[in-house]
Every structure is written in C-alpha cells, then in structure tokens.
Amino acid sequence: MTAVAATAVDLAGRVERVTAVAREHARRTDDEAVFPTEALAELRASGLLALVVPAAYGGLGGGPAELIDCAESLARADLSVALIFAMHCQQVATVVRYGGDELRATLLPRIAAGERYLASVTTAAGTGGHLLSATAPLRDTGEGLLIERFAPIVTGGAHADGFLITMGSPGTDAPGQVCLVYAEREQLRITESGQWQPMGMRASHSVALRLTGTVPRHQLIGAEHGFREISLALFSPLAHLGWAACWLGAAAGALSRVATLLRSPDGRQRFDHRSELLLTRLARARHRIDAVHALLRHTQHIVEDGGDLSAAPVQMLLNGLKVTAAESCRQAVEELVDAVGLRHGYFKDSDTYLERVLRDLRSAALNYHNDRLDLADGRHVLLDRKVTHVGG
Amino acid sequence: MNPEFVALLSRFLKYATPDQITDDAALHDLGLDSMQSIELLFAIEDDFGVSLPDEALTESTFATAGSLWAAVRTARGDAP
C-alpha cells in the first residue's frame, strides 16, 4: 500500500461522522438483525470507503495503520459496522495490489467516489471458513469467465455493490487451486437463501448467496492459481489485523463506558469504588486490552515492513494475533460483566451495552475458527525449534 | 485557592494543619495515598460541580494543592 495522504485529523473527523450514525442506529439494527444501511451511507459520504484506495485514484491512501485506527474507533460504537468496514478495506487493498490495470482503472475511482461497497465471497459450504479449498472451477466460456458459486455466509452480501469471489482455478478440479475474481452486482444473478438470526454480530447481516454470472477476463485478480499467494501475502494478514482492531475497539469501548459509568454520580452511588474485587476486575480487563493492542501494533509493523510473511514464525504471529484478540477481548468484556453485575452487565437497556458486545465478541473465535489456526500453528511450532521472535 | 477547596483538602489530609495547606504543599507528603486521590477527585467533582478530563488526571496535577486547584479552575472554565 502507498504512503499516507490522509492526515490523522482528517480521518478522525470522518470516523466521528460514521460513529455518530452507527451509535444512533446500533440498538435497532441489533434488535432487528438488519444491515446498518445508514452507517454504510455515511461511510460512502465520508469518503472512508476509499480509505485504502491510493490518492492517484482519488482515495485517502491509507495503509494498515489507518485501517486499524478507523476500525478500532468504529468498533467502539458498533462492532458490526466496524467489521463491515474492515472487510471492505481488505477487499479493496487486494484489488489495489493484485488487480490488473484495467480493473484498477475502472473500479478504484468508483470506490473512491463511494459508489462501490465490496463484500467477500471466500467461504464455501463444508470448509469451516477455510480459504484455500476449492469450489466449482471458474470456466472460460469464450465470452468471459463463468461464475457459479454458493456461499453460506457473505457479510453484507445483500447490500454489497461488488464481490471478491474465490473459485476453483480454471481448467482444474484439484482442491487447493483457487483463484480470485471480481464481479459487480449487476453482472450477477443473486439468490439469497436462509434466515439470519445469530446470537451476535446481528447487524453484519451475513447471508447465504448463490451467485451466477459471466465477467470479462480482466476481472480475474492475480494469476489463475493465484489466490494462495494473495492470501498469504495480503488477504489473511489484513483480515487478522482488521478483525483484531475491531475486537479491540469493542472491548476498549466497553471498558470506557464502564469507567464512565463508575465515575458518574449514579455509578458512585451504585458501586463501591473501594471494592478490591471491582478494582481487580477493572485492572484485568484493561491488561487484556493493552496486551491485544501491543500485539496488534507489533504485527502491523511486521506486515508494513514488507518481508516474507509465509515464514513459520510470522505465520504464528499473524495467527496468534487473531486467536489472542478473539479470546482476550471477549474475556475482557466478561470481566466487566462480572464487575458491574446484572443491571449494567446483562440487561439490554444499559448504556454500557455490555450484553450486546459480549454476544458480538462471542463470534470472534468462530469467525475463521480459532481451532483451525491453532492446528496450523501447532505444525508451525515444529518448524521453528529455535522459537524465533519476529521483529527483534 | 478558595476556602471551600482548602476545607475539602483538609478532610483528606488528616496530618496537615490548616496553615500547612498552601499552594506549594505536596499532597503526598501530607498523607494523600492513591486510593484517597480517587476519593478526593470524586469529592472535588461533586462539591465543585466539575468533571476533570482524563488528560488532567496525572501525577503532576495531584502533586500540590496549587496544581490541583489550577486543574479545578481550568475545568470550571475560570479565567487564568
């Protein structure tokens, strides 16, 4: 990604516009399990959908650091909105680095104008979120590339203007040979199926989609077998950085609201701020949040340094970030629920909305399952007998 | 420092005589520990109807009676 054109102040103002809208609608979108259309409209209007679009294409030219800043801030208000945003940026960054000239020239200015919100179609039925497993292969019909694809969970799938879709590589039935292709909503016949009634992340409105359509060859992103490289070098690292930033923001926002409650006149009446149990729980929540923050920023710098991310120690760092952030952010909010009790920890109508955040964060370990990453890292450990620390 | 502020401080500084509570008086030397700092903060916010911003809640703000009073005045929007 390119140098940063957007100033920090510029970004903060844009993010505040979106968080204000997200906050206003968050309770309803959670109650009704509907997509945060108002927040998406503000993401478009504020220019934030173009955060990682290079300035040459009219974007803000942000990189991983700015993605993390914005995602964390949005997540303090609404984790669903933050995740929708982070995943969009992950798709856009992939187009920026791996898209061909023609695709970049047509698509990136439209993203910069707020006209294209991108969703990810990278899961297939029966793979548990595994990125490198085959679906039906992409077929070159002579008129273009034929996409026929079912995806069980597409975050924002009913609202996206375009999709990055993994397919089996053309001309092969071998699992693991996967390519990535871009398709606009207008190029596809899209059928939604199933219900969306999850425990948490209810406003992320992740639906099952069947996608069928033909796109021109220049909408293939990277090589015909290219998704493995894209995934290792950019797609997975950005997913883990973005998700961790979202979860960190959700936990940090929860702690901030609890601290504000405890400091308020009502909170001072209700809680004994000399209670050692209360103080200890607050400290433990804070320590978990700080540990995730440190790990996130350390991993961000490793990704920014541009070295080989496929080495075992780096893979463990990237996977460990995702696993640790998922667990520690949820545990931090659990501590806060115990700290403040039923009224402010468990009831929906508390201004702390810990209840919603805890439900939302329960998905973190399952959103690309921690078990799968632990298994991969168990193998990585055996490849790094010296236990090499990454980044000195 | 106004008399109400000195009176409030003296509730938390059990070992200080009123004439010891001057602008330069080091609050920790007069017996203010970290737990009492929180309680003193809450008492200030209640009695003076202010909310000190997080950025002001530092060691240096709580160093002396004068530095703490300056933070209260800033939070009240008093002219410097």
Image: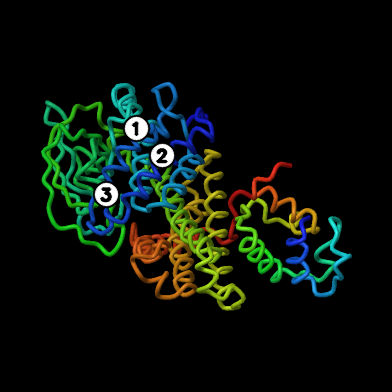
Is A361 left or right of A283, judged from the image as shown? left
Q: CA distance from mark 1 to mark 2?
A: 9 Å
Q: Amino acid type of disc 3?
A: Thr
Q: Nearer the viewer, residue A81 or A373?
A: A81
Comparing marks 3 and 2, which lies closer to the viewer? 2
Of the image marks 1 and 3, the number of the one nearer the N terminus: 1
Which quadrant of the figure has residue A183?
Answer: top left
Tell me the tag on residue A17.
Answer: 2
Q: Please determine whether, in this image, residue A78 is positioned above or below residue A301.
A: below
Tell me the tag on residue A63.
Answer: none
Of the image marks 1 and 2, the number of the one nearer the N terminus: 2
Q: Please determine whether, in this image, residue A291 is positioned above or below residue A160.
A: below
User: Badge 2: how crowded within 10 Å, few (<14), some, or many (20+)?
Assistant: some
Q: Secondary structure at mark 2?
A: helix
Comparing marks 1 and 3, which lies closer to the viewer? 1
Tell me the tag on residue A45.
Answer: 1
Q: Nearer the viewer, residue A93 or B80?
A: B80
Chain at numbered mark 3: A
- Residue A195 visible in the displayed image: yes
In the picture of the structure, the residue carrying the numbered disc 3 is A155
Is A289 left or right of A101, judged from the image as shown? right
Of the image marks 3 and 2, the number of the one nearer the N terminus: 2
